[in-house]
Amino acid sequence: MGLSTGASQPPLPPPLADQSKPSTPSSSNLPYLRTAGRAEQKSSWNERRLVGSVDYDSGERRVHVEVDGVGVDKIPARKRLRFYSSRWQKDWKVSEVVENVLRLNHWDDIEAVLNCWAGRFARKNFPLLLREIGNAGSLEHTVQVFHWVKTQKSYCPQTNMYNMMIRLHARHRQTDQARGLFFEMQEYRCKPDAETYNLLICAHGRVGQWRWATNILEDMLRAAIPPTRTTYNSLISACGSSGNWREALKVCRKMTENGVGPDLTTHNIVLSAFKSGGQYGKALAYFELMKETNVSPDTVTFNIVISCLVQLGQYGRAIGIFNSMMDKREQCSPDVVTYTTIIRAYAICGEIGNCKVIFDMMVAEGLKPNIVSYNALLGAYASHGMHDAALATFNSLEQSCIRPDVVSYTCLLNSYGRSGQPDKARKIFDLMKKNSCRPNRVTYNALIDAYGSSGMIAEAVEVLREMEGDGIEPDNVSLSTLLAACGRCGQIVKIASLLSVAKSRGIKLNIVACNSAIGSYMSVGDYDKAVAFYGMMKKKNIKPDSVTFNILISGSCKLEKYKELFEFLNEMEELKVPLSKEVYSSLINAYNRQGQLAEAEMTFLMMKDTGCIPDVITYTSMIHAYGAADDWRKAWDLFKEMEMNSVEPDPIACSALMEALNRGCQSAMVFQLAQLMREKNIHLNAQAFFEIVSACSILRDWKIASEVVELVEPTLSLVSVGLLNQLLHFLGKSGKIETMMKLFNKIVASGSRVSFTTYAILLRNLLAAGRWRKCIEILQWMEDEGVQPSLQMYHHVLSHVSKNNSMKHILLIQEKIKLLRQKAG
């Protein structure tokens, strides 16, 4: 069966036009880039060349590779007779055969197309056909074509054909099939060469089978085939990609002993082996050795070194190397991998603005970002909950004709989860499934965290069930996230249920999950269960870390179990677990609560002596301790020390210092600190507002109090009732009755809760100002809001009304007093 140009042609894909025959070009389809005439006649039969055409009517162009191969005019005469005697036979070029085959689906009859090709009678065409169809990347089509080639009478096994097939299987990570071809070629008495062994070593290295790769090298030596530099580089890469850097170094030494010197590629592979094995320090030492031996690094070298520096937290050095590459871009220019690594470095440092700057710089340099680059930027935005920027990046990713992958969707979902928008995170999850992108375990964990962080435990548990229904087993991260959420929401029943789920699923809790369980019990105040779980953890030989002891020590401090606290501290020292900043802060808090300032100071000094640098939490704990001891000077000096050590104060630290200053009658310094907070853009929390108002009250500075009112107005619904009452009291006491009433009206309009005490403050200040008529309105407002005025309130208002002889209002208030007494019995 073959192809026909007549009306009875079978339903096979139509062949390309026979370009081997001269044709008259039309105005709408003009060839270009094509050699013709004598140059074409002199060209080799296996030459690959570009051929293009332009369709001016549709405004389209087409460029493809053309390979002639052996045509019908060069095949034996008896074969030509078969060609001319059948109308189904076609004198296609090799490139035309490849295009016809690739048009078919893998289940179609490929042999029917190939049997129409006259070039099948020339064995020289077979390597060309396999090479071209292999370059197209279609493994299934290539395998079927190779099976067909082996059935042809003119077929003769050739090493280069088997090498091409092994290379294609290696590219698709089909190691067993590649090894099968190796044995098959030997059965056909086709001798493997150095390239064959190199391809097999590379194939096993791709899937991390470095022992197989080592055995293949030994087979190569037994076959008396000398290994090349490529052989050793492939084996070193196989060992290094598996993280076996020691074996990679052994191969490198063997390479030098056998007289094959390493090149730059070898050095880069060794560096990559150190990186894969987590030996970042050794990688940097090897890099220094390279420079001492005058080996000029390239972009790949610098990319590995920058990545190792980022892993070690040496971000300054990493950015310094990047800048030097930018300065010497003619010698070694940064590529997409370089820019992506620097974006990740800035993301870890929290400098998200610089991430976008580097991304834009990459585009400005003419480099096209790949999916990994976009995902790095998305991950940076997601880590800080910047959902708007993440969505904009995601949209630009789609506009660049790059299909988002599971990492892209997960980062966008995580950005909404971190910003407290679990519903939008769910929409991204549904969109992901709709676009045929299957969620992985990380995606489900991110959605669980989105619901758990917002206190939506039922929804988070439902996602866990959905995860199991999708065939993905929950891991320790899933359970840790849910346990922490249950602890925050105080759902102790759910904590026990989750632990039961882990046990029934056979999930072995790691230290992170155990810490989450202990922290959850401590959050709900169930100290006994937390300690019991800690005991169970030790029985299962799960070694506690500094986080475990910090949870236990801080929980004991909050529950005022100081004896147990110090027992945990002693156990921590026995296990030689280093004390963290959090543990030191908990100890200082414990001493502070017991009024032991000297012990707190000693702990703080010991912390600095051991090289553990205090953070803002530690400094805040000590400021609280000095404030409780009425030593505002030491609290102020400590605050200055914090600034000198480049520790940025937060609202809690500032409000703690304000409290210490007010207790020490240094209210004027409170205003100085408030000004400093404004200059540093530090948010004023409720405690800071309270202390500022207290300072205004002490100094009777109503002007600053009015400014505080203006600052409070945008967030009235978030301010505590106690602070609002204090503001109203101070304004009324200062004689600013109208300002007091305006603030009260704004409080009511904002939806804030108004208490009985609030009305009492209003009445007291209005009566002091002689505004008894307004007091009667206030009493009516109270009744309308369901707040019952007291007898004392009515009597105070009645005394002022009686002085003004307003009989109408006197009778009204007396009636109210009578009804209230009747209710009281």
Image: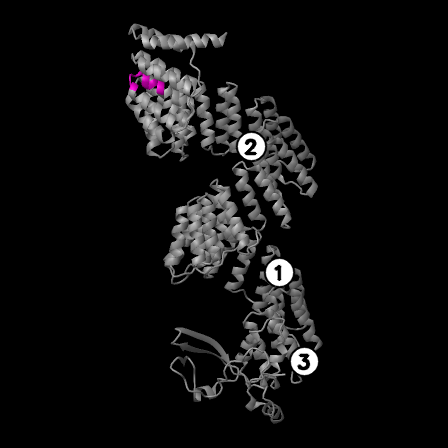
Magenta range:
728-737
Query: Do callouts 2 and 3 mark residues in contact (Cβ within 8 Å)?
Result: no
Image x and y of residue 568, in percent: 61, 28
Quickly name the residue at label 1.
207
Q: Is residue 459 above or below residue 281?
A: above
Q: Which of the two labelled residues, at mark 1 and mark 3, occupies the earlier sequence position? A: 3
Q: CA distance from mark 1 to mark 3?
A: 32 Å
Mark 3 — residue? 151
Mark 2 vs mark 1, CA separation in Å: 45 Å
Q: Secondary structure at mark 1?
A: loop
Residue 136 x %, y %: 54, 71
| Mark 2 Cα shell of 10 Å, populated few (<14), some (14-19), many (≥20) | some
Task: Tell me which residue sits at (52%, 60%) in the image.
Answer: 267
Q: Which one is in front, 779 or 459?
A: 779
Q: Compare residues 253 and 213 and report the one nearer the observer.
A: 213
The quarter of the picture where residue 236 lies is bottom right
Quick one: quadrant of the N terminus? Answer: bottom right
